[in-house]
Amino acid sequence: MRKVLKRLNEHPGIRGSLVVTHDGMVVAASLEQRMSEEKVAAMASTVVSSVHRALEENGLSRFHRLTLKASYGKLTIRDTGTVYLVVVMDRSFDPGPTEIEIESARMRIKALGEMKVAR
Amino acid sequence: VRQIRVDRWLALAGFSRRESMSKGALVVVGILNSLRHSRELSLLRKDTRTSPTPGNFVALAERCIAFGRVEEALRVARKGRQLFPDSARLSEIFGYANRRRLNTKISALRRRISEKPSPTDIGDLAEIYLEIGDDEQALRLSEDLARRFPLNERPYLLLGQIRLGRFLREMILQDGQEALSNLRRALNINPVSERAGILLAHLHFAVGDLERMRRRLERVLKASPANEGVRQFLETASPSPACDPDSDEVFEDDLPASEWISAAEARGCFVNRPETFGPSLLEELGAPSVPALAVTETAISRLLEDTASVPGVVAVAVLDRKASPLPDRNGTTNDRRLADAGSAIVRTAEEAGRRMDVGTFQWCTVEGDFGCLTVRRLPDLHLVARYGPPLRPEHAPRTLESCSDTLYAPPREVEHA
């Protein structure tokens, strides 16, 4: 899983990526040096669990994609079925051209998750 | 009538009608075009003056770029960003116009750095990115500069300036603390640095640490006695008798300066408005210098109606500045459950942005089996919308931003609209 994340991080504009479970536990993370892995992982899992709860409490079902834009960065969270893929990006980064890479990383992580479940 | 006008313009341009119809035609077309452009621009300028909305600033800046008036576009976008720092469209235009102006310089510096990296070139490039408004790139280059040349004052000065600008705009604790440590480091390397002294004094002033601010400015004045701005500000802002600026007795080690910053962040507001700091470098820091405009009740109802009428929008809600749902309004829909979900999302996202060092929340889009949900931060409010096709999630933040234009138009114009 780390390999998939590292390959994704090689794309310009992507500052790091991690995988968290639906209840917010961090499975794997790979972030740029300047970002504290602990802090980002903690906050990504908080976002996943809080948004999940907020939607459920208000009669909305589970989300499968979330994009958050802040003044100096962007965060996207994709559901892979068993876990969430979280990608941290630059503010001006347009995910359009790299959308395929993010999507293929999501599919690979999904496949990895399914393999583990099958075993 | 048109023929007479054309003849008159030909005469003005120094052409006689018979001999120069072919050459003159081009000139005339040019003149007529420039007249048309100035007329269009003057109408847009008037609109922006009478109704300063993000949409009007964007329209004016875009037309300025289209007519080749990049400098004016920059001025307009800068002014617009001061009024509406959250407007994504204005930030994009500002970045684009600036990049267009500085592109040649950037590529030349990049080439020189790749051949032989020097602190001057890396610092210059970081400053250009800062001017463009690309803080992230400037931050990265300054960090790189600090790693390569740790005894140079410039990277710390740049890092301090970037972090201070962010702190004054968004009041995030980490930015304040890093501004403090980097500016102090710059002063350790060059104790007479006027710029570092003024920037540090600005930070102390904003968080209410006036004693440190006064001493810092006195040191600046001692090193550069000709700085009239600092002298005048010191005379008006701190009437208390001046003490020895070199004494560190209660300067560096009494109540730590970082605690003043934490206190300001915890309170959620500055003790002194940053824009009232005398020897201000605020424009360079990119901090908003004009307070946000007041939003009326009518305008909020109009915003709800406008957003609800966007094709694809199912439900709308408005939250206040602190993301608490606003009470229901007569005749408009303020979906309570959507407001609660939006409120929880904004609070989580705000916290995440601050902790992850990516700044303050601007917008969030959530896609699920229920359709899509977007929360957009506006200068005084948050707008939440639930929608489906034809509105697409990648376009929703911009669409919601454009719905907010009527919020800032004068009431008479809102009624008229």
Image: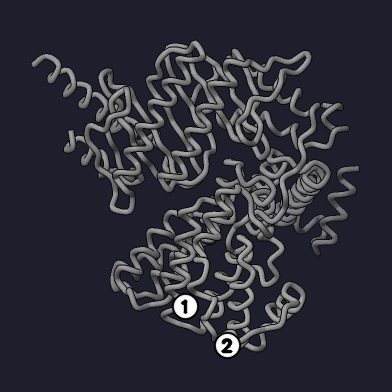
Location of residue A27 by image quarter: top left
Pick the residue in front: A87 or A57. A57
* Disc assigned to residue B327: none
Instruction: Locate residue B197, reporting x and y percent.
Output: 55, 76
Q: Is residue B309 visible?
A: no
Instruction: Locate residue B247, reporting x and y percent.
Output: 54, 85
Pick the residue in front: A119 or A101. A119
* Disc assigned to residue B223: 2
Instruction: Locate residue B23, reporting x and y percent.
Output: 70, 56
Amino acid type, label 2 = Ala
Q: Give the structural element (helix, strand or loop) at label 2.
A: helix
Give the residue at x 85% y 33%: B411
Q: In which quarter of the image is the C terminus of chain B?
A: top right
Determine the chain carrying the residue at label 2. Answer: B
Q: Can residue B292 be seen in this view?
A: yes
Q: In this view, does B25 lie to the left or right of B10?
A: left
Pick the residue in front: B88 or B220. B220
Location of residue A112 by image quarter: top left
Amino acid type, label 1 = Leu
Give the residue at x 68% y 66%: B277
* Disc assigned to residue B187: 1
Instruction: Locate residue B119, reporting x and y percent.
Output: 37, 74
